[in-house]
Image (cartoon, rainbow, N blue to C red):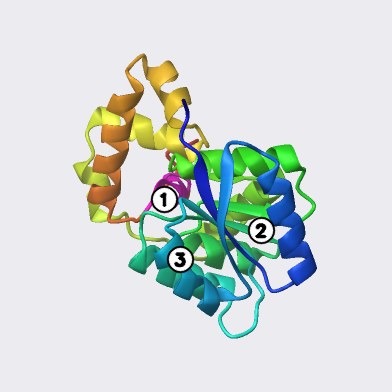
Amino acid sequence: MTAVIRLLVVDDQSLFREGLVTLLSTMPEFEVVGQAENGQHALEVAPGCRPDVVLMDLRMPVLDGVKATRRLRAELPSAKVVVLTTFDDDESIFEAIRAGALGYLLKDTPSEELAEALRQAARGESFLTPRVATRLVQRVATQNAARSAPTPPGLAELTAREKEVLTLLGRGATNKDIARALNVAEGTVKNHVTAILMKLGVGDRLQAALLAREFGLTN
């Protein structure tokens, strides 16, 4: 039997937050273990409810979603963060991902897509809607054109197989996709991903994927 995914819902709009809780509570694979009205409140309740995934709004009083995500990832690294917001501007997307969010969704996202994003985040996998992914890639491309970034030292330390895995990560592949493409066990892929994160000095697979795109491994 698949373990139930424990959720913390963070949004300053009470009506929207309560609607999300009601929606997610109808899905047997999820259990809403907490609610918070801003980022500071989320940091206060998260240690007690131990969520697997935090569904985080961005623009909130007291402490915004980006700052809360950064602190939450440092203080409770087992909790994965998925941003759910109305804002799809480049800066919001980029800052949320840099802070450690594994997913970035807009509030008009269909419920089925939201559920899939939460499932993937619980597995440690990233999820971006096509529109958000396009904006993110465009932002990285713009930065590359503006400056010639030095290659991170860890990139040279990757084995040939790890570079293959990183390339597929940069193309948005899940662990299951990578295992199928390379004809290896999914557990082997997880081990490669762990090694890649350590060598590159990044906190999660999404940041590794950004590096892969930034340095042309996905071309």
Instruction: Say left or right for 127 vs 168.
Output: right
Checking the image for residue 46, the label placed there is: 3
The magenta stretch spans which residues? 204-213
**Residue hosting label 1:** 211
Horizontal and vertical percent for residue 201?
Answer: 27, 56
The Cα atoms of the two marked residues, 2 and 3, are separated by 18 Å
Give the residue at x 47% y 40%.
170
Mark closest to the chain's N terminus, 3 or 1: 3
Checking the image for residue 84, the label placed there is: 2
Magenta region's main secondary structure?
A: helix
Q: In terms of depth relative to the viewer, which is nearer, 119 or 210?
A: 119
Horizontal and vertical percent for residue 102?
Answer: 50, 51
Check the image and name the residue furthest to the bottom: 62
Horizontal and vertical percent for residue 107?
Answer: 75, 56
Give the residue at x 58% y 77%.
64
Instruction: Say left or right for 116 vs 157.
Output: right
Mark closest to the chain's N terminus, 2 or 1: 2
Horizontal and vertical percent for residue 91?
Answer: 62, 69
Checking the image for residue 181, the label placed there is: none
Q: Is residue 65 above or below residue 50?
A: below
Mark closest to the chain's N terminus, 2 or 3: 3
Instruction: Say left or right for 178 vs 129.
Output: left
